[in-house]
Image: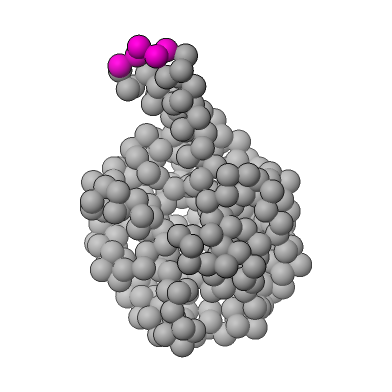
Amino acid sequence: MPLTSTDDIIGPAYDRNRGVGAFNVVQLEHAEAIVDGAHRAGLPVILQISENTVRYHGSLTPIGRAALSLAEEATVPVAVHLDHAESEDLVREAVRLGFTSVMFDASKLPYERNVAVTRAVTEYGHRADVLVEAELGEVGGKDGAHAPGVRTDPDEARAFAAATAVDCLAVAVGSSHAMATRDAVLDFDLISRLRDSVGVPLVLHGSSGVSDTNLAKAVRAGMTKVNISTHLNGIFSATVRRELDRRPTVSDSRTYIGAAREKVACEVARLLRVLALA
């Protein structure tokens, strides 16, 4: 099927108060597993490629084109999204490749500068029919740059969304990036107030640290797009480690990476159902 617009996935979910899973791609096998999981669940999914992953590969083009190809061949809606880009050049590259949404993260900048730069990126994205996500109220734990105690103010969020014309807003409500345990304490009342105030779909970053029960509760409170990365990376790595321990003489990487891909696909399918049925 043709590549799905991110807006065509997020918009209906927002209208129906349902959650959409957005999972980070690190290697080709991650992308394959995420799309496989979406097929098993029969639900839409968003493939995300972060600026950190671009640095790992040395370029956006190879991994980006692979993700786009998988999305185009999928029989369920699959969108491709640039995650946590701080470079405007990288945003432009993603748009040229055909990504249907970008997340521009200027949250480290002073508020007025964040607004000005994000507005410019939004205008650029909209000229190409690309959805733009931004961040206000730093989400804890990313590269040591954010304080976990930060929370997004609803009034400021409403003003920011109006000033920048962004399509989605990532907000700080208690989750933290790179959590290895699923015990984050979310402020569900704040999520509800943000949904009532902002007027665009909300995005929960750092969702690997949130339990199934609280993911569903966050969606019911008003979250739409739910980003998950570390949790899947942990499953992938643990499976590879277990397979290598079980068969220490194996040399064919397809043996253990294939097993990891299967485990991730199963977990993606399960999480998509958790979010969709919230």
- Please tell me which residue is depicted at 38% across the width and 52% down the height of the picture: 49
Where residue 264 appears, as percent x and y from the top left, is 50, 33
Q: Is residue 144 above or below residue 127?
A: above
| Residue 89: quadrant of the picture | bottom left
Where residue 128 appears, as percent x and y from the top left, is 31, 69
Query: Which image quarter is the N terminus in?
Result: top left
**Quick check: 36 left or right of 267?**
left
Magenta stretch prevailing secondary structure: loop
Regarding residue 9, the answer to whether it shows in the image is yes
Where residue 53 appears, as percent x and y from the top left, is 34, 51
Q: Is residue 21 magenta?
A: no
| Residue 171: quadrant of the picture | bottom right
- As rendered, which of 95 and 208 lies closer to the eye? 208
- Please tell me which residue is depicted at 39% across the width and 26% down the height of the picture: 257
Extreme-bottom residue of the structure: 112
Q: Is residue 134 above or below residue 241?
A: below
Q: Is residue 143 above or below residue 153?
A: above
Q: Is residue 250 magenta?
A: yes
- Please tell me which residue is depicted at 54% across the width and 55% down the height of the picture: 177
Which range is magenta? 247-251
- As rendered, which of 57 and 278 lies closer to the eye? 57
